[in-house]
Image: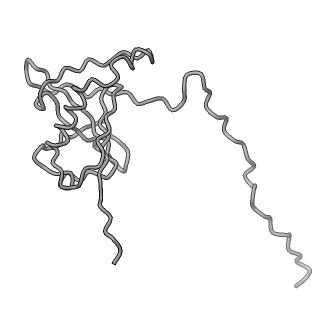
Amino acid sequence: MPPRVIKAHHIHVKSHKLSILLSGFPPATSIGELKAETLSALKSDVAPDALDVMAMEPPEIDVETEQDFELCRAVKDKGKPTGAFEVLNAASTIRDAGLSAWEVLFLQFRDRATGDLLPITYTLPPLYDEGDEPPQPQVSSPNKGKRKAPPEDEERM
């Protein structure tokens, strides 16, 4: 019997221009544990001046506890995001929430004064650098790669 492949989930958490990759979690991991790992990543002091070098403004993220934010998933219709988000229950597991192995989640912060959820803010990275130009579309003939049947002679029959 071949060895059993252990399924691991790699969760990509996004907010503003910030991306956090949570890697190697089994399906039985709770969403609360993912929130704890996300909080640890948000509070860590990794490359403190890295954003200044790339001329990016650091996002204003003010979190102290796991209650200051929620993990949300984009609602999709026929595989395309609709612009709506659903908050994941912290007590459920990755399997129960139906997350895929390479799921993208979004951070939704809470207003500390009211406790209400703020709108989700994120920026998708550009496909091309500012100096690069997108590749020109290739023009090809519509018959390329197709053979035409020789004209049939009506006299043969």
Identify whether 75 is placed above or below 98. above
Name the residue at 75% across, 59% down.
Answer: 145
Give the residue at x 30% y 58%: 7
Q: Position of residue 118 (x, y in %)?
A: 19, 25
Relative placement, left or right, of 23 versus 43 is: right
Q: Residue furthest right?
A: 155
Check the image and report above or below for 74 versus 101. Answer: above
Does 113 sit left or right of 147 as displayed?
Answer: left
**Rendered location of residue 18, percent (x, y):** 33, 28
Residue located at (33% from left, 70% from top): 3
Above or below, 106 against 46 in this view is below
Farthest residue, direction left: 114
x and y, in percent, of residue 24 in the image: 29, 49
Quadrant containing the C terminus is bottom right
Q: Residue at x 37, y 49 (%)?
A: 79
Q: How is the image coloured?
A: one colour
Pick whichever, 75 or 90, lies toward us: 90
Estimate the x, y position of residue 56 in percent, counting from the top left: 40, 17
Q: How many marks?
A: 0
**Residue nearest the viewer, comparing 15 with 40:** 40
For the N terminus, give its image quadrant: bottom left
Q: Quadrant of residue 134?
A: top right
In the rendered image, the vertical position of residue 30 relative to residue 40, given as above or below: below
